[in-house]
Amino acid sequence: MRILIDTNVLLRSIEPKHVHYQSSLDAIDLLRSLGHELAIVPQVLYEFWSVATRPLLNNGLGMSPADAHAEVAALQKVFRLLRDERGVFSIWEQLVSSYGVKGKQVHDARLAASIQRHAATYLLTFNTSDFARYSFMTAMSPIDIVAGTIKI
């Protein structure tokens, strides 16, 4: 089964002092060991770069562009990169219109559109409630995966 990995999981997986560091790594390892295909989309990498290079004082990781580039390159080796496609926009447009999406939630809608376009069905994220409105997909937390409260 194809599972899309959200930015917040990737960010936690490279931040050893973060409370969700280990659950991110463990969930990824568990899902991979069960034979699931773990994938990312360009949007996730854009968001990753933004947070990684943002100063620590602004809730970022304070990385240099060179370090962020190295992390993005490593992520592309670890996860399958599903390319942006023209079909994602029309799905996104339909989602934001039919679900009445507004504000910052339009970014989550784009990720949901990518999930639908690439037939991923599942999203591994710490923000499961942000995706509850989309009936065609299931958002699951690394914490729940590791605890065994969600099985796929």
Image: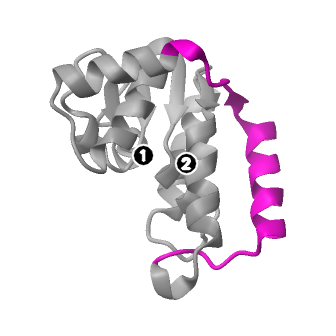
> Picture coordinates of residue 53 (x, y %)?
65, 71
Circle number at residue 14: none
Magenta stretch encompasses residue 73: yes
Magenta stretch encompasses residue 69: yes
- Circle 1 packing at 10 Å, graded few (<14), some (14-19), many (20+), is many
On the picture, is 19 further left or further right than 5? left
Q: Residue at x 37, y 50 (%)?
A: 126
On the picture, is 152 further left or further right than 134? right
Q: Residue at x 67, y 24 (%)?
A: 83
109 above or below 47? above
10 above or below 152? below
Residue closest to the eye, 132 or 53: 53
Name the kind of residue labelled 1 in the image: Pro
Quadrant in the picture for residue 100: top left
Q: Is residue 13 visible from the viewing direction of this image? A: no
Name the kind of residue labelled 2 in the image: Asp
Q: Which residue is drawn at 52% across and 12% down?
A: 87
Q: Give the range drawn in magenta.
A: 59-87
Mark positioned earlier in the residue sequence (1 or 2): 2
Residue closest to the eye, 103 or 28: 103
The residue that label 2 is drawn on is: 26
Circle number at residue 142: 1
Q: Is residue 32 visible from the viewing direction of this image? A: yes
Q: How many labels does the image show?
A: 2
Query: Disc 1, disc 2: CB below 8 Å?
Result: yes
Q: How far apart are marks 1 and 2 (CA)?
A: 8 Å
Q: Is mark 1 on a helix, strand or loop?
A: helix
Residue closest to the eye, 76 or 92: 92
